[in-house]
Image (tube, rainbow, N blue to C red):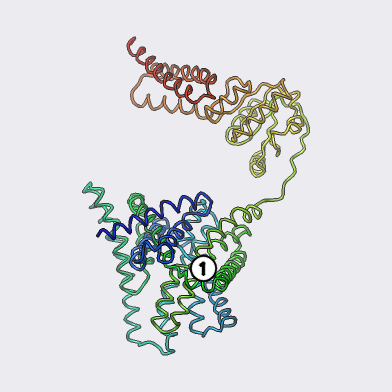
Amino acid sequence: MMAGLVTVVVLLVAMVVAVPVAKRFGFGAPLGYLAAGLAVGPAGLGLVTNVEAIAHASELGVVMLLFLIGLELRPARLWVMRKSVLGLGGAQVGVTAALVAGLGIALLGLPVPAALVIGFGLALSSTAMALPMLAERGLLANQSGRNAFSVLLFQDLAIIPAVALLPLLGNGSVPDADGAWVAVAKAAAAVAVVLVGGRFLLRPLFRIVDRAGTPEIFTATALLVVIGTAVLVEEAGLSMSLGAFMAGVLLSDSEYRHEVQADIQPFEGLLLGLFFVSVGMGTDLPALMAQPLRFAALALGVMAAKALVMVVLARVAGVPVAGAVRMGAVLSQGGEFGFVLFGLAVAGGSMTQEQASAAMLVVTLSMIATPFVFAAAERWLVPRLLAKPKRPFDSIAEDGSPVIICGFGRVGQVVGRVLRMRGIPFTALEKNAAQVDFVRKFGNKVYYGDPTRVELLRAAGAEKARVLVVALAETEESLRVVEVARRHFPNLTLFVRARNRWHVHQLMDRGVENPVRETFDSSLRLTADVLRELGVADDEVARTIDTFRAHDERTLVRQHAVHHDEGRLIQTTRQAAEELQSLFEADRAER
């Protein structure tokens, strides 16, 4: 018992140390977990030796990941994705497997059965690695992220027929027909049980548990659904991950989806991390040290081949260059199902233990290298591919407009619409070319240019205009426009949108009187509506809001004098809260 607890402590310490360091240097959590496994495993410090037991337990992380993915994929959405799943995913697996198998036969002299198994195994990518890397950068919702998920989903489905066909490669004989039909029947029965049971039993089950009002039992029920479905499907000879994915899809339309997701997420994150730790611990460092260049070349060669195939197929499917490169980088590694396939292939006689160990080491090295490759692509390659040719700023014919609006987003457009309704001409400057093209469709007079440039303001007629409205979203750009206007165009009256109190103080430092806080008035209006709904009389609501507004504006001015001193700023904030409370108490006593 104590030995098991010591192992848990060692693993947790390694994870707590390695993951923040990896994320600090921009390589993502998976690399941190792999490094932790390498450090404490048999080939490292040797603090943990029961690698196989940990690997079995950690498989639940992949299972829960697929369940959560299923929760996000409603059946209607899954149907919409069918073309990318079957088309792009099928092409990736088929082409990559054929290419890797051909290279294995031509360059390494592998027997055909072993080459086919290795080709297919290395064509698979790591769902557990790719999806977290995409999620960390918020890329799952864009086109390349969705397509990458489609490919991964097809790979998870493809492992089923691959495992079923392995006996054909073992000794060249066709497996017993009766046994094959029994296996197919078991698999079909398991899928039917999951689909029918999920359709008619899951919601009533969660409804009964929810009425009990015991949160921990609800969590236990969610875990039972995930693990029970996975075990049922595995017993039928299918992938545990596939069973969990189906359960997630069946629950995706239910009213309990979000609560189940919140209960499962913490277990998924920790167990998925443990999966990568087990991969790191299982790395055959002695074999790698014996032939480091050979294995490094094999891993890099596989990654290059997979990335090239993925980029070409993605481009054929209409994915932009930057998205295709991103898909190639994130899917270039081998996957966790490769370990399963190679182990079964050894048991079936289609490849030797030496070949399987070498293939597993290549998969591990590719998984270790992928966070570096993906981070490098995201930092240096993708931004250059996304960058569009610089569009020249518009030339502005000065027309004597009395108002110049810098920034024509949601705030600047409201100002412009009201001015146009009153028949007051204005010149609007916007740095976002797409925004300029969009608002021009509605007849707005807006020019593409950088309002922080004095030449552009002069061309817009700043020397003759009366008012400059600074409605920029970026705080630093707003401050630069104010500085330029104060220095070069003192004739202008400035009205400036302020993002927060710090922005207000910076504007006051630059001589701007009464900056407009963008959410202050709307927040007060919302508060007034809440008070009225609670039965407070209109005159009392108005007095309350006016008291708060006046006090907050006085506090803002008072804090401007000390906003560079954090200690005094905190002190004045506390004093202001006490003063406001005293004001309301006095007002309540008078009534």
Instruction: Say which residue appears at 46% left-offset and 58% top-offset.
Output: 30
Residue 168, position in %: x, y?
A: 43, 85
Depth check: 553 or 337 in front?
337
Residue found at the very far front of the displayed protein: 45
135 over 97 or under it: above or below? above
Depth check: 568 or 90 in front?
568
- Quarter of the figure with residue 68: bottom left
Looking at the rendered image, the quarter that the N terminus falls into is: bottom left
Side (left or right) of 41 relative to 22? left
45 over 164 or under it: above or below? above
Can residue 252 be seen?
no
Residue 128, position in %: x, y?
A: 44, 61
Q: Amino acid at mark 1?
A: Gly
Side (left or right) of 443 relative to 287? right
Secondary structure found at label 1:
helix
Residue 328, position in %: x, y?
A: 57, 63
**Which residue is label 1 attached to?**
89
Q: How many marks?
A: 1
Instruction: Say which residue appears at 21% left-offset and 48% top-offset.
Output: 212
Can residue 23 be seen?
yes
- Quarter of the figure with residue 584: top left
